[in-house]
Structure formats: structure tokens, C-alpha cells
Amino acid sequence: MLPGVTLVISPLISLMKDQVSALTQAGVKATHINSSLTAAQYL
């Protein structure tokens, strides 16, 4: 894998959640940002 940050843009919230779940299970630090989060959760 390449070092650094990878940004994935997806219009599907459920897909983002699935991708983050798979990445964290693989030992990769990952999170998602979408309209379902509150402003406090962005921080």
C-alpha cells in the first residue's frame, strides 16, 4: 500500500460505512464523514 492519506468519495453512506469497517478490520486507521454526522462528530 502507498503511504499517506487516501480520500474516497462515495454518494452512498452505507457503502462508506462498509468500506471503513473493512479497512479497520484490516488494521488501517479509517473514518467516514457524511451528512449523518453532527458538527461535533467532525472533530
Image (cartoon, rainbow, N blue to C red):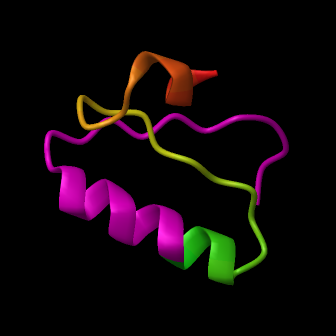
Count of numbered circles in the view: 0
In the image, 3 versus 17, the foreground residue is 17
Q: Residue at x 52, y 77 (%)?
A: 22
Residue at the far left: name it: 11
User: Residue 8, located in which quarter of the rendered image?
Assistant: top left
- Answer with left or right where residue 5 lies relative to residue 13: right
- Dividing the image into 4 quarters, which one contains the C terminus? top right
Magenta includes 42? Answer: no
Residue at the far bottom: name it: 25
Q: Picture coordinates of residue 2 (x, y %)?
A: 78, 49
- Answer with left or right where residue 11 lies relative to residue 30: left
Q: Picture coordinates of residue 21 (x, y %)?
A: 50, 73
Q: Picture coordinates of residue 3 (x, y %)?
A: 85, 44
Q: Which residues are magenta?
A: 1-21
Q: Residue at x 46, y 44 (%)?
A: 32
In the image, 36 versus 21, the foreground residue is 36
Magenta includes 8? Answer: yes
Q: Residue at x 36, y 71 (%)?
A: 18
Above/below status of 27 relative to 12: below
- Answer with left or right where residue 4 lies relative to residue 41: right
Q: Picture coordinates of residue 35 (x, y %)?
A: 24, 29
- Dividing the image into 4 quarters, which one contains the N terminus? bottom right
Q: Residue at x 53, y 21 (%)?
A: 40
- Answer with left or right where residue 43 lies relative to residue 9: right
User: Residue 11, located in which quarter of the rendered image?
Assistant: top left
Above/below status of 13 relative to 7: below
Residue at the far right: name it: 3
Above/below status of 41 relative to 13: above
